[in-house]
Image (cartoon, helix red, strand yellow):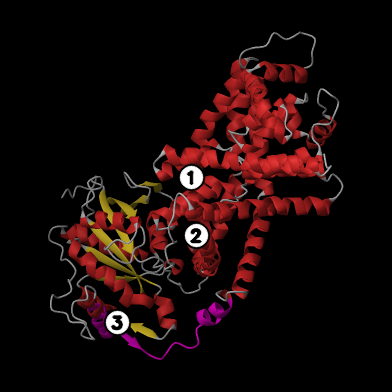
Amino acid sequence: MDNHPDHISKLVLAGNPNAGKTTIFNALTGLRMQVGNFAGTTVSRKSGECQMGDRRLELIDLPGMYSLEATSLEEKVAGEVLMGTNPKFPKPEVVIAVMDATNLERNLYLFSQITECDLPCVIALTMIDRAHQEGLDIDIPTLERSLGCRVIPVHVEKKQGVEELKEAVGEIFTWGLAEYPRPHKPSEDVKCGVGCSGCPFHGRFTWSEQIVSQAIKTRHAAPGRLTDSLDEVLTHPVIGLGVFLGIMMLVFWGIFSVATVPMDLIELGFEHLGDFVEAHVPTGDLQSLLRHGIIGGVGGVVVFLPQICLLFFMLALLDDSGYLARAAFVMDRVMRRVGLPGTAFVPMLSGHACAIPAIMASRVISNPRDRLVTILVLPLTSCSARIPVYVLMVTLLFPSQPLYAALALVGAYSLGIFSALFAAWALKKTILPGESESLLLEMPLYKVPNLRNSLFHTYEKAVIFLKQAGTVILLISIALWVLSTYPKADLPADISPAVAEQLQLENSFSGRIGKAMEPVIRPLGYDWQIGIGILSSFAAREAIISGLSIVYGIGESGAEDSQLLIDNLRNATRDDGTPVFTVATCLSLLVFYVLAMQCLPTQAVTKAETGSWKWAGFQLLYMSVLAYVAALVVYQGLRLAGIS
């Protein structure tokens, strides 16, 4: 092995879920991390460089696992990396095994398998303070002698043990990878304590019990633990569900109130950038492409980044505190009735910020069928991009009735949630039959969440979102700009810019497509102008606002004046003089936007996560049919009832 200082050696962090791997990883690497997937899989791969002495090391944070005998794709990938059987990933040189001091016996089961990978090991022992509070005294020297490797107690928040961990890893390279002693393996003749011969696990568990009995002394039984008391309330089938709903209301209230300021600043920044382009690039197609196609398109997505970051930050805090596992347990009772596991509730919550990171968050679901069903129904939850459309329609419906307006918004969100649950149930009864996998979940101890870890997690998700959504949105925005700009219309010189925009759009490819769509969408109460708005929504749902601003004669900039836009839409009439945006049309359009798949970047992520355009195409098809039929029923039903 190359021990030259310029050689970048590979280390891996391995351990059980909730053992503290992320905290160790962040402490060793800081912000110098990269996020991607292991080659040929959808399993997340987080790596970062760290400096230990004069040596640069690449640290890979493996997915949490309980055993190398894989029960999920994540465990399978992690096991292949450790054993060196993954052809696309070289075998690491050193393992940092992260163990929870309060659950040492269970953690040692995995370590007993790691010892057979023939790799130098260092153990990072976390939660040592919690073990002490529970009356457990851990004899570190005895533990080191029993395991045959260094054991470093680590408490990152108190800055304890991190430097010692680096020194222990550096000692391996100083000694020499080939010569450094390997940890002790469990002896072949270890017998099960209760004599259950033939059990494939008894030897490892008995070995773990023996190690713990030698290294841990119990001073006293742990006093009535706060965890047990809280769990009586938070996992109660009725009270626990009420607490969960209350917490989620607070989370979303925080998202939609706190995120307003940074969203306004981002929007203002993109406006200034557009003004700069307009001032320094000559008038023409290049200026229009830069301002409306690229800056406008990308800005329309990036503006929702604060809401997405806040959602993931709050979910990370809840996860780190230990509550999210309880919420999954409580929701499992509800979710299983529609054919989904309790773990699906996390991505479904995330979908209310943006479907793209929510689909990526579905990786927490181990069963492939359950995960596929979750991905297919996630876009039915109302993401942030739908909010401008909801607000516009609700304002047209109830201009001076805030109570009814609020109820309409709640109804839109509720329709999205119930539609997602119904679609999941229907998929499980038809093309994706089968029972949801039973929820096997570790209940971690409650603790004060680590702010640094939560910020790292949020940063990681934000980077993924920008990479996944930003690139696709850019291409789609350019394509839609081309459709709305060409062919050029022969316009009179004496018309206003707003009217010129309107006529150009009407005669463009987008306008022609909108007119071709009109016979199909007329039964829903829409004309060709609304058809153009729907077409523009494929870049981003909220793009209908600027599309309607142009086709109804107030120009692109009119979208920024909400009252002017609302007045224009309220006064818009058809050729026969009847109003366009009636109660029936507005409700039909509201329902259509709740249910329709109009976000092509989401389609691209669905393809990436499922590995096939087949499922992305199916998602687009079934949601489009569902939206069309629901909007048709609403519009025609209201007309039959005399409400037009």
In depth, the one of 486 and 168 nearer the eye is 486
- Kindly identify which residue carries mark 1: 463
The kind of residue tagged 1 is Val
- Whichever of callouts 3 and 2 sits on the residue coming sooner in the sequence is 3
User: Which quadrant of the figure has residue 108?
Assistant: bottom left
- Kindly identify which residue carries mark 3: 139
- Kindly identify which residue carries mark 2: 339
Q: In the rendered image, is residue 354 in sight?
A: no
In depth, the one of 421 and 522 nearer the eye is 522
The kind of residue tagged 3 is Asp
Between disc 2 and disc 1, the foreground one is: 2
Magenta stretch: includes residue 216: yes
Quadrant (top left, top right, bottom left, bottom right) of the C terminus: top right
Tell whether 481 sits left or right of 446. Answer: right
Q: Residues within 10 Å of mark 2 (few under 14, many from 20)?
A: many
Residues at marks 2 and 1 touching, judged by CB atoms closer than 8 Å: no
Residue 272: horizontal and vertical position, in percent?
66, 31
Between disc 3 and disc 1, the foreground one is: 1
SS of the residue under disc 3: loop
Cα distance in 3D space between marks 2 and 1 = 32 Å
Judged from this view, the residue extending furthest toward the front is: 640
Up/down of 401 relative to 218, above or below: above
Q: Main secondary structure of the magenta part?
A: helix
Tell whether 62 sits left or right of 116. Answer: right
Q: Residue at x 31, y 44 (%)?
A: 39
Q: In the rendered image, is residue 254 in sight?
A: yes
**Range covered by the magenta-colored residues:** 207-233
The kind of residue tagged 2 is Gly
